[in-house]
Image (cartoon, coloured by chain):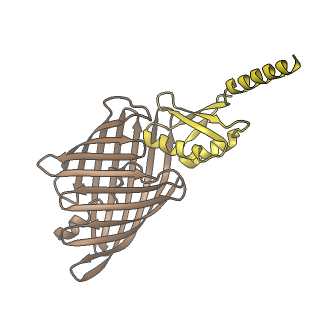
Amino acid sequence: MKSILLLAIVLLSSIGKAHPVAFKGATSLMSSNEDSQNDILLAHSVSSQWALGASYAQRPDRQASLLRANYLLKRWNQEDSQGNIYLGVGAGSSRFESSQDFLGFSSVDADWESRKYYIAAHYSHFFPKSDLNWNEKKIRLGVAPYLAEFTEINTWFIIQFSQKENEDIRLAQLLRVFYRNALFELGAEVGGGFVFNYMIHF
Amino acid sequence: MKVVFTVVALFFSFSLAKANPLATQTVGVKGMVCAFCAQGITKKFQAQKEVDKVEVSLEKKYVTLTYKEGEKLSNEKIGQILKDAGYEAVFNN
């Protein structure tokens, strides 16, 4: 049960990785890492609305591989801000000891950001078997301590609330730094545990 | 005397040609609020053979395109490039 729960963590957690669909023709390498878990995703944006890719997740007692698709359902481009709603699906397999099971995944992401403020919400639903359902919820709030230009290093302070299934809500503080096509996030959870995410566009 | 005049005339014509700046165009971009957004937009425009240089201002929310000599992108093309990048063009002209 613990292993299944662990697998439910952020297999497609695009909330930790900025926009899950980038500009047309972009290839993105994304990774999220917490205590005892590592996820990596390689995705290609075939248009400004669709991104296709594959992900791999490593847990102490199992591994998972998925083919994935993310879709930009709606974007609001405003003069000083941008809002987005994304949908995600995935299918693949997980390996636990000698057994291999089907994995399915779906997610919804919404975000809004200006140069100064950032808010994002994430819901993902993970179903290793038809009679087992797991989900994860996240909310993020961010503020930029200064307004950076394109050629400067951008910095954000982010607070993240997350909950897996019916576990307690966890709180994490993160420092996000990005420059041009590379983004890094380093953080710590209240009560212990680290968070390290990165994303690179090619 | 005629030769000297020709040389001087050629010198000034080259100097003037060199001083003549390349054509630039500034286009507003709705939704461009982060460096990641700007990165995609820059990459898209730099891939165009007509474009020599791309400059982005997040503060002023616009992109300045410097064209190669005799080259220019149509507003329609610029709008499509920005759309492919996920943004909207705002033309002032």
Q: Where does residue A134 sit, x and y in percent of width and height?
A: 27, 65
Q: Give residue B11's position: percent from left, percent from top.
A: 75, 23
- Residue at 65%, 28% (x, y): give it: B92
Is A83 or A183 nearer to us in this picture? A183
Residue under the point 32% across and 63% down: A125
In the image, what residue occupies the spot 57% across and 49% down? Answer: B84
Give the chain coloured yellow: B
Residue A163 horizontal/vertical position (percent): 22, 54
Disc count in the image?
Answer: 0
Q: Colour of chain A?
A: brown
Please name whichever residue, B67 or A70, is drawn nearer the observer in this view of the structure: B67
Q: Residue at x 70, y 36 (%)?
A: B69
Q: Is residue A104 left or right of residue B45?
A: left
Left or right side of A200 for B80: right
Image vertical order of residue B12 relative to residue B47, above or below: above
Seen in the picture, residue A140 relative to A43 is either above or below; the reply is above
**In the drawing, does residue B68 fall left or right of residue A131?**
right
Spot occupied by residue A191 in the image (x, y as percentages of width and height): 11, 48
Q: Is A99 left, or right, of A114 in this rendering? A: left
Q: Residue furthest left?
A: A191
Quadrant, the N terminus of chain A: bottom left
Taking the view exactly as shown, the residue that stands out farthest to the right is: B2
Q: Residue farthest to the top?
A: B1
